[in-house]
Image (tube, rainbow, N blue to C red):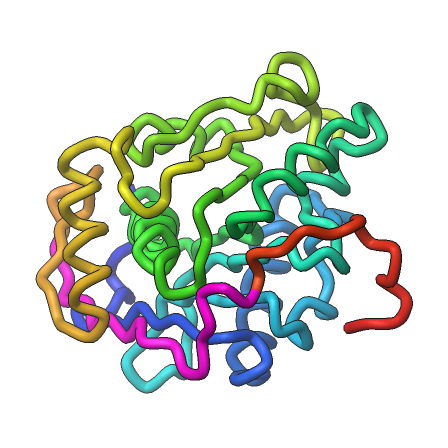
Amino acid sequence: MPQTGNLDKEIRIRAFRAIDDPETCRKFIEGHRRVLSIYGIENITTNTDDWMFRRSIYVIVVETLDGSKLYGGVRIQIADGIHPLPIEEATGKMDAGIYEIVREHAKNGAAELSGLWNSKEVAGLGIGSLFPSRVAMAMATQIGITTFFTLCSPTTVRFKDWMGGKILEEVGREGTFYYPKIDLIATAVYSDDMFELAATHPREREKIMYLRNNLVHIAKEKSPFKDYYTNIHYALTLDNVDPKEFQISYEPYLHADKHS
């Protein structure tokens, strides 16, 4: 059973550009590293802190109302032509075709959901995994993203049907490969209809569209897996956002040493 005794009945899900809130980014990194260490994962490519200094990174956190504690979150890493997406770093050595796939989608805005984690207080509730993923899809129109990639664990790959995701069979062994270490399997998934969400489950589409049209509100939410309710304060408005900023054509990563 999930340890919900210490989980606040009032929590917040907040979105921001990484460079605008370095303190919360550091809390995110610490929480993510604690979770990874439980599974003996120390060398995952996304387990760094350089991302917090990039304009092309947005962060979604599940936190207490005062921001003192994080229960989980996820990063949105936009394909910027400078920094490879985690899926490119993970699969590029096996099949360089991933670079062309990302480049084509980046013309209309592409990003990857990475660094998804949740603390033990919300384990098994979906609050630290499904809810931030739902929020990321709601934010797609704000930041101009039409395609999301993600590397799913055996636990989170079940969400792909709800979210309208498809397995990226062009990489690995029909979309699966060992990552981030030899005894763990990841599945490459993508969704390329972020604006219309035609393939998304009707229940999830309704929730995502509501979030998209109500960026700031409070809702009593039920865990999709347990009979557990909490009031979530959504704070999803982003400042100084240009939805066309990262709709680009580029030669991948030729100038990575000259930019941050």
> x, y percentage for residue 233?
20, 73
Where, by quadrant of the figure, is residue 225 drawn? Answer: top left
199 versus 169 height, above or below: below
Q: 214 and 110: which one is in front?
A: 110
Farthest top residue in view: 174
Q: Residue 227 colored magenta?
A: no
Q: Quadrant of the N terminus?
A: top left
Using the rendered image of the protein, determine whether residue 185 is visible from the camera's viewpoint: yes
Q: 12 and 149: which one is in front?
A: 149
Residue shown at 68% from the left, 48% from the top: 85
Q: In the rendered view, does 248 fall on the left or right side of 147?
A: right
Where, by quadrant of the figure, is residue 31 drawn? Answer: bottom right
Residue shown at 79% from the left, 24% from the top: 95
> x, y percentage for residue 89?
76, 42
Q: Residue 241 colored magenta?
A: yes
> x, y percentage for residue 13?
31, 68
Using the rendered image of the protein, determine whether residue 2 is visible from the camera's viewpoint: no
Q: In the rendered view, does 234 fall on the left or right side of 112?
A: left
Q: In the rendered view, does 89 fall on the left or right side of 52?
A: right
Q: How many labels does the image show?
A: 0
Residue shown at 79% from the left, 49% from the top: 252
Q: In which quarter of the image is the C terminus?
A: bottom right
Residue shown at 23% from the left, 60% from the top: 212
Magenta-colored span: 229-245
> x, y percentage for residue 18?
56, 75
69 versus 46 height, above or below: below
